Image (cartoon, helix red, strand yellow):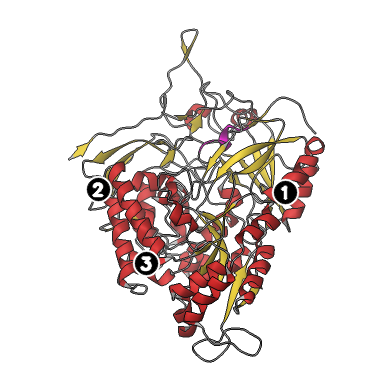
Amino acid sequence: MLRTRKLTALASVIALAMAGQAFAWEEAPQLAQQVADGKLPPVDERLPTDPLVMDVIEGPGEYGGTLRRAILGGGDQHNMVRTIGSDNMVRWSPDWKEVRPNIAKSWDVSDDASKFTFHLREGMKWSDGAPFTADDILFWYEDIFSNAELTPNKDATFVGPAGPVKITKIDELTVEFDFGAPNGLFLQALAYGFGYHPTAYPKHYLSQFMPKYNDDVQALVDADPAAGNWVQLFNLKAGPMDTPLFWQNPDRPTLHAWHLTNAYGSTDRVVAERNPYYYKVDSKGQQLPYIDRITYDQVEDVETILLKTFNGEIDYMLRHIGRPSNKASLTDNMDRGKYGFFDVGDLPANIMILMMNLNHTDPVKREVINNKDFRIGVSHAMNRQEVIDLLYFGAGQPAQTAPREGSDLYKEEYAKQFTEYDTDLANEYLDKVLPEKDAEGFRIGPDGNRFTLVFLMADVFGLQYPDAMELIAGYAADVGLDFQIRATDRSRLIDLHTSNDFDAYLWNCSGGQADAYTSPICYVPTISNSVSWARGWAQWGIDPTTGEEPPQAVKDIFSKYKDVRAAASPEDQKTLMIELLDMAMEQFFTIGMVQNDPVFGIARNNVRNVPDPLPIAGQLWFPAPYTAQMYFEGGANLP
């Protein structure tokens, strides 16, 4: 039996009146012209019957303009995800206090939090004008999520303590998600970035690439030189949003505020135009978004983004440039570029983590890496404060991968264990594992050869990983460890680590704040496109008939996380999560280096409705889910 926990958007059905007449929805002038030209239906036919009314920061905005950004090649798709993507069934409030309606106008939750019934918006449409209904969600569930060829690894968001979710269509506007057991964290997880899947696959468009719906699908395969079969073709046309493939198919309809007009990587500039069927409005009844288009100039490096910012060619940016090392030069060029700063509450568990492959296919490297004494020795060999001083101008704290101070889950012992820089102590631990050295002073592995780890390294996030890796390799050499560096781009790095073809790499990790509950990717082995340190165990954790059976201590962590997810009350969730963190910290899976101070972004002086600070953490892909649609150009008419 369901107990009603209906949540509706603030004034999700607006009934405004002007001079006794029903209030008319407003639209951008460019769309009004298309209506006049017969190219679009009227705005009241494009909006759902109960559009979502969004709060704004300064006030209702003005239509028009282009938001200019920059993007790197080779796997920088999150640059677009964070501004265009992330329209999920539900969303977080900006203050992180509650989950609010979004695509779903309301929902009901069963008493034991095992069933979630979502009520969709009548008349909602995809960006090409086709209806969005429960059939689209069923298409994702039945034909993609449940298809082992298309989804060999199921996203943990949709796998509860009792297994994968079962989705049932109640009617055209109602769907039930049944986990078969309590799953108290589901709504929170659904509001984060990876909760986008159920609402990202338009059946009317994507079904043509499946033999189930198209008897002539082979003709489409034959016409695409990159596709060897229908599965490859479907993946090219319907790749997940957090991969480049999503952004390389501009023909794919979306529910986002803007849709691409050309493919990422195909030209020097990616252009996204407003979605004329977007389902959100402001308090005046103006259809969002305000900005006509967003452009992303594809450049080679972060230095080019900085130069474009100095020259006033960037309107809004935090990705790549919002780091302490850039603050002085950005400050010096503020008048020239006509921009100001805003704070960003981006506080992950750690921004620089040595992720070693605990499921290595090489038995020698696996034996050494899995020895906790080895990881402790490496940790004590790292001069974290020097890294912070040299690369981040002292902005940050030496720390392991752990919840941060200020979080309800924070414990000092989590963050500070094994962070003391002490080469004698490092050698003491390493001597327990690799006591012998060669003529050059490097440690010899169990096979009698020099023990070498190759670290993959990509220049990402503006965190100066190339410079950091040079320092890390030097610290390792001081205690007899041979750390080699293999530079690559982000896309190639992800390909290697997701295929388990790596020794180690540098990355960052969410889980520094409340996102530890729903994105514990450095505390629990998890399937992720960005984070891999025990991929075989992670596969087993989702489905014990796959992957690699882990040791009992890791099984216990999987079991504890199931308890966390099953807990119905926040109090029980917190108690169980702390128990899980105690277990994970004892295992010491990854080696953290730095917990950063809050970072910053820049916005041109005429960009309005920009939140300060901007709330963000881990898989909460801001500003897309809440604020990007409200940005508008106002004030000075800047060049």
Crowdedness near tag 1: few (<14), some (14–19) or many (≥20) residues, C-alpha within 10 Å = some
Q: Indicate whether 231 appears above or below 6.
A: below
Q: Residue furthest left?
A: 1
Magenta stretch containing residue 630, yes or no? yes
Query: Which comes sooner in the sequence, label 1 or label 3?
Result: 3
Q: List the residue tagged with mark 1.
A: 326
Closer mark to the observer between disc 2 and disc 1: 1
Query: Which comes sooner in the sequence, label 2 or label 3?
Result: 2
Q: Residue furthest bottom?
A: 448
Q: Amino acid at mark 3?
A: Ala
Closer mark to the observer between disc 2 and disc 3: 2
Q: List the residue tagged with mark 2.
A: 114
Magenta stretch containing residue 206, yes or no? no
Give left or right: position of 322 versus 448.
Answer: right
Residue at horizontal 64%, vertical 42%?
A: 600
Determine the CA span between mark 2 and mark 3: 24 Å
Who is closer to the viewer here, 579 or 306?
Answer: 579
Q: Amino acid at mark 2?
A: Ser
Q: Which numbered marker is on residue 309?
A: none
Q: Quadrant of residue 222?
A: bottom right
Determine the CA span between mark 1 and mark 3: 45 Å
Give left or right: position of 70 versus 452.
Answer: right
Q: List the residue tagged with mark 3.
A: 148
Crowdedness near tag 3: few (<14), some (14–19) or many (≥20) residues, C-alpha within 10 Å = few
Q: Please state the extent of the stretch shown in magenta in the rendering.
A: 626-631
Q: Residue furthest top?
A: 19
Residue 414 percent across, percent down from the top left: 44, 56
Closer mark to the observer between disc 1 and disc 3: 1
Q: Is residue 499 visible?
A: no
Who is closer to the viewer here, 227 or 117?
Answer: 117
